[in-house]
Each structure stands twice: as structure tokens, then as C-alpha cells.
Image: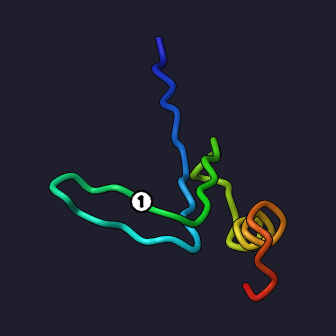
Amino acid sequence: MTLEKEYYINLHVGGKFVCDPHLRYLGGKMVRLKEDLDTILYFELCKIVKDGLGFNTV
């Protein structure tokens, strides 16, 4: 019996984190991705930021 774990990557861009008293993210954009952490590449993350969030200077 194998137990598969799910991993998510949360990308936050253009906003800020505030603590009042709980940590929250205000403004900007956030993309939540379900990825295989053993195989995702840096260049794939760059493409996600460029295409998904609209940033061309990655």
C-alpha cells in the first residue's frame, strides 16, 4: 500500500504579505499549481509566471 502525497506550488506576484495578526496576501495575483516536485523544472516555472501571471521579465 502506497500513500501518494499531493503537493501544490503557490506563486504570489505583485502584492504583499501582511500580518494582522494572521498572515495574509493582499493585492496582486496568486496562482496555485499542482505539480510533481521531483520533476518540475526552473524553466517551467518561468513559463508559468510569464504566461499565467503576465510577467515578461522573468
The residue pinned by badge 1 equals 25
Q: Going 21% across and 52% down the picture, which residue do you hit? A: 22
Q: Going 30% across and 66% down the picture, which residue do you hit? A: 18
Q: Residue furthest top?
A: 1
- Left or right: 41 with respect to 30? right
- Image quadrant in which the C terminus is located: bottom right
- Looking at the rendered structure, the kind of residue marked 1 is Tyr
- Under circle 1, the secondary element is strand
Asked if residue 6 is positioned above or below residue 12 in the image, the reply reads: above
The picture places residue 51, in percent across and down from the top left corner, at 84, 65
Choose top left, top right, bottom left or bottom right for residue 46: bottom right
The picture places residue 53, in percent across and down from the top left corner, at 74, 65
Asked if residue 4 is positioned above or below residue 42 in the image, the reply reads: above
Q: Going 52% across and 64% down the picture, which residue do you hit? A: 27
Choose top left, top right, bottom left or bottom right for residue 57: bottom right
The picture places residue 52, in percent across and down from the top left corner, at 78, 60
